[in-house]
Amino acid sequence: MFSKLNKRMRGEGGFTLIELLVVIIIIAILAAIAIPTFLGQRQKAQDAAAKSLVRNAMTAVESAYVDTRDFGEVDADILLAIEPSIVFSMVPDAATKPGVSAQDNAVAVDDSIGKDAYGVGTTSESGKTFGVIVNKTASAIDGHAPGNTFYIGNDPASW
């Protein structure tokens, strides 16, 4: 009985070198496909977090506007009382040059555009700047069209 078992064990030599190389090549191909995909997802997640932060800041500004009826009267203290989780900075050209980072949970707000308009922006961890200029009137204010104008960097773009 033991002799049959010993013969069987001696016949099992393991994997050949060719079989091991084929497995290693398959793993390398899968890694070459998967790694760039995962790297792109990280940047997309950072950009999505920055956009979400801008939208949350817009909600805070809109809430303050309900009380003041004038975006020019909205300041960082009022916004902080409404949304304490965001660091607000009052900056001109906030939608295109915020100077703050979403990584720090910070948003720049421009209340100098007019009584019925404002800008909000932040820079994502990936380095892209996201901003919005909101114009509540039916006509252009300071060159800003009515409605919401979204920006990526200095260029109007949808996001």
Image: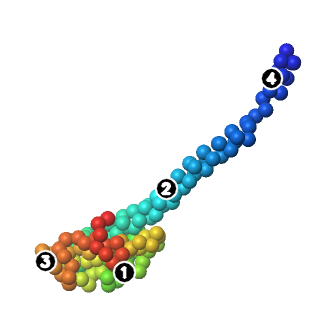
Q: x%, y% of residue 43?
A: 46, 63
Q: Earlier in the sequence, mark 3 or mark 1?
A: 1
Label 3 – label 1 distance at C-alpha:
24 Å
Residue type beneath disc 4: Arg
- Vertical placement of 140 versus 31: above or below? below
Q: What residue is pinned by disc 1?
A: 97
Name the front one of labels 2 and 3: 2
Residue type beneath disc 3: Ser
Name the front one of labels 1 and 2: 2
Secondary element type, mark 1: loop
Secondary element type, mark 3: loop
Tell me if mark 2 has few (under 14), some (14-19) or many (20+) residues whose alpha carbon lies within 10 angstroms of its own.
few
Within the image, what quadrant is residue 105 found in? bottom left
Label 4 – label 2 distance at C-alpha:
46 Å
Q: Earlier in the sequence, mark 1 or mark 2?
A: 2
Label 1 – label 4 distance at C-alpha:
74 Å
Q: Earlier in the sequence, mark 3 or mark 4?
A: 4
Name the front one of labels 1 and 4: 4
Query: Residue at point 13% right, 77% down?
Result: 139
Residue type beneath disc 1: Lys
Within the image, what quadrant is residue 16 found in? top right
Q: Earlier in the sequence, mark 2 or mark 3?
A: 2
Q: What residue is pinned by disc 4?
A: 8
Q: What residue is pinned by disc 3?
A: 139
Query: Residue at point 51% right, 58% down?
Result: 36
